[in-house]
Amino acid sequence: MAHTVTLIPGDGIGPEVTQAMCRVVEATGVQIEWEVHEAGEPAIARYGTPLPEHVLESIRRNKVGLKGPITTPIGKGFRSVNVGLRQALNLYANLRPCKTIPGVPSRYENVDLVVVRENTEGMYVGIEHEVIPNEAAEAVRIITRRASERIVRFAFDYARAHGRKLVTAVHKGNILKITDGLFLRCAQEVAAQYPDIAYNERIVDNLCMQLVQRPHEYDVLVLTNLFGDIVSDLCCGLVGGLGVAPGANIGDGVAVFEPVHGSAPKYAGQNKVNPTAMIRSAAMMLEYIGEVEAARRIEAAVEKVIAAGEKVTYDLKPSRDDPTAVGTQEMAEAIIAAL
């Protein structure tokens, strides 16, 4: 059976890692019909908007999308396409597994964390304005019972389905007593409905310290939007960086998968960057659409190539100027051979 998937290659290094990913997915034998659409800066020149409505309609129709990284201008220009996608499609759960891969340089062994981040509200609702031009600005943070209960329930359901033992609600309720107080109460109420899963709570700054000191004490973390964004990058750093980290944005009956890393425009077109995160995001997508065996084969092939340490990109070498490092497409070829 063929699956139709909306594919957004992205910009910067996006098209290169997307090409590598498509080759690996094709090598599994799973039939994917890619419905390719542009978003971000390339779409502005053609359609006058970074996120054209026909892109959203494609994802709604196909129920699943896969996107490469897209550049978000800092302090000016258009709003994040990632945020726009999540809000327009109500992709309320951002899922980021952070697991040690043997051969990836990192400070720890056997780390296995899952970050579940609320994706639609918090600080990222984008309600902000200048109070005094060029002197003072204000942003509104929105936390609702509906979204808080929904994301905590997602975390517990994920834990139950994947044999996880502990869910930690992460908050700043000691200072943000009303907004994070509501999130925390909702977490406690939902946790009581899952007696088979252990539950605890951590203040976000304390959690960050403890993750650096002893990450093995944690399992599934559930957080509001901004805290989840920050903590998920910290967790990626514990296992070797964003270059190997996949991600998913999941709603009710629709999902978009993407690597955690950015578009790295300075490396665009150089066939240099690590395609692992994009390929592993595709593996998450395959699992989501029921192609579990293919997903596991990709993960195993990626781990085999990285563990061997030969045909890998520069960032996976002991020294970043190692002359034996291979390019993006060459690493994809090694993963295909390992399949």
Image (cartoon, rainbow, N blue to C red):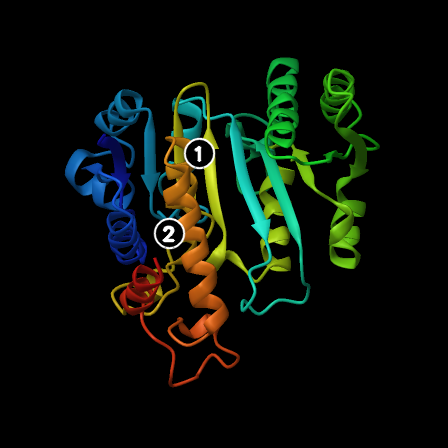
SS class of the residue under badge 1?
helix
Amino acid type shown at disc 2: Ile
Neighbour tally class for label 2: few under 14, some 14-19, many 20 plus, Cα within 10 Å: many
Q: Quadrant of residue 336?
A: bottom left
Q: Is residue 194 left or right of residue 90?
A: right
Amino acid under disc 1: Val
Viewer can see residue 106: yes
In this view, the residue in front, 187 or 205, is 187
Residue 254 is left or right of residue 119, and the answer is: left
* Residues at marks 2 and 1 touching, judged by CB atoms closer than 8 Å: no
Given residues 298 and 144, the one toward you in this image is 298
The correct choice, above or below, for 270 with respect to 51 in the image is below
At 46% across and 23% down in the image, what residue appears? Answer: 251
Q: CA distance from mark 2 to mark 1?
A: 22 Å
Find residue 133 and report its horizontal and vertical position in percent: 53, 37
Who's the residue at 44% across and 49% down the image?
74
Among numbered discs 2 and 1, the one appearing first in the sequence: 1
Instruction: Name the residue nearer the viewer: 121 or 6.
Output: 6
Res. 79 in view: no
Q: Residue at (41%, 77%) from the top-left corner?
A: 310
- Which residue in the protein does label 2 denote? 279
From the viewer's perspective, is residue 330 above or below residue 277? Answer: below
Using the image as rendered, state which of residue 39 and residue 317 is in the foreground: 317
Q: Secondary structure at mark 2?
A: helix
- At label 1, counting other C-alpha atoms closer than 10 Å, the crowd grade (few under 14, some 14-19, many 20 or more) is some
Name the side, left or right, on which 190 lies relative to 96.
Answer: right
* Quadrant placement of the C terminus: bottom left
Q: Nearer the viewer, mark 2 or mark 1?
A: 2
Q: Residue at x 53, y 37 (%)?
A: 95
The answer to which quarter of the image holds residue 143 is top right
Residue hosting label 1: 83
Relative to residue 246, is residue 173 depicted above or below?
above
